Image: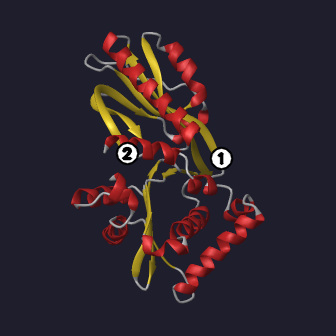
Amino acid sequence: MAPSAIPVTLPLRVGARTLWRFRRPLIRTHIGLAAALTGEVPRLAALPSGAEGYLITALPAHLVAPLRAALPELHGFVRQHYSRHHADLRIGFDAYLAGFSAKTRSTLRRKVRRLADRSGGALDLRAYRAPGEMAEFHRLARQVSARTYQERLLDAGLPEGSEALTRLEALARRDAVRGWVLLVDDEPISYLHAPAEGEVLLYAHLGYDPDFADFSPGTVLQVEAMRQLMGERRFAWFDFTEGDGAHKRLFATGSIDSVDLLLLRRTPANLLLGRTLDGFDHAVRFAKRAAGATGMERLVRGALH
């Protein structure tokens, strides 16, 4: 069945603040990690009438030129450029730890031990994978998610409601999800939600209670989740998905230089839109390099108020 175009929002954004939104009917295509690792140019479905182009996310950067050459009737605009981090779960936990520096290994052990001491001598980490376990996971994880900055500021927390739970249970029936909750005094303080695509687990949602930030609960949970996954040997890769970040860099064993690529029909309106987006993105990157991201965001906020 051929994909259909959906209205896609294309924002002008500085940090977490959206200044303006454009909309176009596009075919969204996400490049999964397994496909990205092959290094092959993706084959796109024929562009149907009514669609103005494609939005391709997590495309390996070295494939931009050959993809543009294969589709000369479309004009390409790079919207984001980032490292896509991933971890090889097949190497075993001992080899994984050996990839960290001695200082980092010591720091991780200290963080785990400190939180274990706070928990009465042992971590209270609960893992979830079966359909009958998803209701408890969702309930506990939602308690944490509601307190995270991802949900309060970015609207990017773990989805709530019965439909979200139904999706979790459906994934669990296919053995295509893993979840963890870290608790202290029987109260959840951190969670990790990782659905699967084949042999690849996706870093979908991670959050922690800010009242426990000094104990680095997200870091501790990630360490122990990686230990379990490498012992389980059910999955081959852990995909930290789009976007950079210290947490992702710390726990990854490799990365792929990636982009989000917008391919549009060569109409005057589309070319104007693409150049507007491109120019704005370049201006923001230049301003951040010149003044620092924090200073740029303060400048924009000041202009808006």
Under circle 2, the secondary element is helix
- Viewer-side residue, 166 vs 193: 193
- Answer above or below: position of 153 versus 143: above
- Viewer-side residue, 20 vs 300: 300
Can residue 188 be seen? yes
Circle 1 residues within 10 Å: few <14, some 14–19, many ≥20:
few
Can residue 156 be seen? no
Residue 132 occupies which quadrant of the picture?
A: bottom left
User: Pointer 2: what residue?
Assistant: 301
Residue 175 occupies which quadrant of the picture?
A: bottom left
Tell me whether circle 2 and circle 1 mark residues in contact (CB < 8 Å): no
Look at 36% across and 40% down and name the residue there. Answer: 303
Look at 57% across and 18% down and name the residue there. Answer: 66
- Answer above or below: position of 302 versus 148: above
- Answer above or below: position of 116 versus 128: below
Q: Nearer the viewer, mark 2 or mark 1?
A: 2
Q: Mark 2 belongs to which amino acid?
A: Arg
Q: Mark 1 belongs to which amino acid?
A: Gly
Look at 57% across and 25% down and name the residue there. Answer: 63
Please identify the residue farthest to the left as the structure is shown: 162
Please identify the residue farthest to the bottom as the structure is shown: 120
Mark closer to the chain start, 2 or 1: 1
Residue 260, horizontal then vertical, whole percent: 47, 32
In the picture, the disc for residue 64 is none
Under circle 1, the secondary element is strand
Residue 185, horizontal then vertical, whole percent: 43, 86
Q: Is residue 175 left or right of residue 230?
A: left
User: Pointer 1: what residue?
Assistant: 254
